[in-house]
Image (spheres, rainbow, N blue to C red):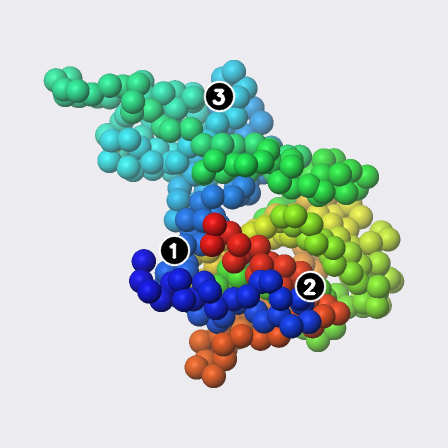
Amino acid sequence: MSDRLPELLKAFDGSLPLSRARTIPSAWYFDPEIYALECEKVFGNTWQYVGRAELVRAPGTYLTVELAGQPILVVRDEQGTLRAFHNACRHRAAQVINEPCGHATKLRCRYHGWTYDLAGKLRGTPEFAGVEDFDHAEHGLPPMNVETWGPFVFVHQGTPTKKLAEYLAPFPRMTEGLGVGDLRYFDRREYVLECNWKVFVDNYQDGGYHVNTVHPGLAGALDYSQYRTELHEHNTVQISPIKQSDDPAVAKTRAGTHAYYWWIFPNLMINLYQGVMDTNWVMPLGTDRCRVIFDFYFTDIEGEEAKQFNDQSIAVAHQVQLEDWGVCEEVQRGLRCRSYDTGRFSVKREAGGYYFHQLLAQTLRE
Ligand code: FES
Ligand SMILES: [Fe+2]
């Protein structure tokens, strides 16, 4: 650690009231030491969303993901227990599984053919006779904490202080009546943005501040005067009453009484409308780049009429994403300007943005 890192960490004051607060310093958006610390403490030591529970429902099914530089493997064993490991073979650290998802009866590393059972026990080591002081039992895949809530799988690479449901609270209780569990996965869109992952979260967390200016289409569907943000322990929710939009595609696909925009610290966002949910999952790919994955869920996914509605809904979300994409990349370039360091928050709108910075700073300093 350089002397610079403690200085940088100290430069944000999260104890101020919102009316006096400043954002995290701009260097936090491109400094490699801050990035390394985030990978360790934020992504490596909190509950992290890794994918859809339906992919690992049946025995033998698995999913893999790369999360802030750490390859992760989640698998349902024959007994029905969900397990998670780092996706790195104990021989030379090749990825044990190379597919994003699938089904297996054992985990076989394609490099030299070592095999593990679905519980991570090392079972086969070809041409390894004569190796001394080598205990198979000590060369299994070390277990990682894994839990599901509703349609989501989360892992924790460290030692969680809370069960997942407790970490997510009050999201499970507050969405009980909205039928999240009945929605069905329909499709996915992926975007690679040339900005730090936090720029995307900041943009999400500005309490609708940019909706009228950046999203004219969406703005017509939200009653902006009633838009509000609630702060909870590890998450926030922005709630807006819905009004009838003039744009027919928006009006049709953004129905119901309210829109709910949940953000789960640090990088999962869940947008809920009547019969429509999409998750925005942002993953860092370095200091100045991130991947954003949108997964779309709907009440109905069968038949032509449902497909038409769902495609229209995805098109609305895609348009919003294109608009956000532009500002996010612009912000990243601006953050590198020598004359910009910190910014202030709108007291009326940006409580969620400051709260993100407070949670982040707290996690980095732990
Ligand atoms: S790296 Fe997996 S068997 Fe060698
Ligand atoms: Fe936006």
Q: Amino acid at mark 2?
A: Ala
Q: Residue furthest front?
A: 15
In this rendering, the label closer to the viewer, 2 or 3: 2
Label 2 neighbour load within 10 Å: few <14, some 14-19, many 20+: many
**Residue visible at 74% across and 59% down in the picture:** 229
- Tag on residue 77? 3
Labels 2 and 3: the sequence-earlier one:
3
Q: Using residue 38 as the reference point, say whether residue 349 is left or right of it.
A: right
User: Would you name the residue on which mark 1 appears?
Assistant: 36
Taking 113 as reference, is 268 above or below it?
below
Report x, y in % for residue 174.
77, 43
Give the Cα separation between the discs numbered 3 and 1. 33 Å
Q: Amino acid at mark 3?
A: Asp
In the structure shown, which secondary structural element does the residue marked by tag 3 occupy?
loop
Report x, y in % for residue 161.
54, 36
Give the Cα separation between the discs numbered 2 and 3. 43 Å
User: Would you name the residue on which mark 2 appears?
Assistant: 351
Q: Verify CB contact (< 8 Å) between mark 3 and mark 1.
A: no
Q: How many marks?
A: 3
**Residue visible at 37% across and 60% down in the picture:** 33
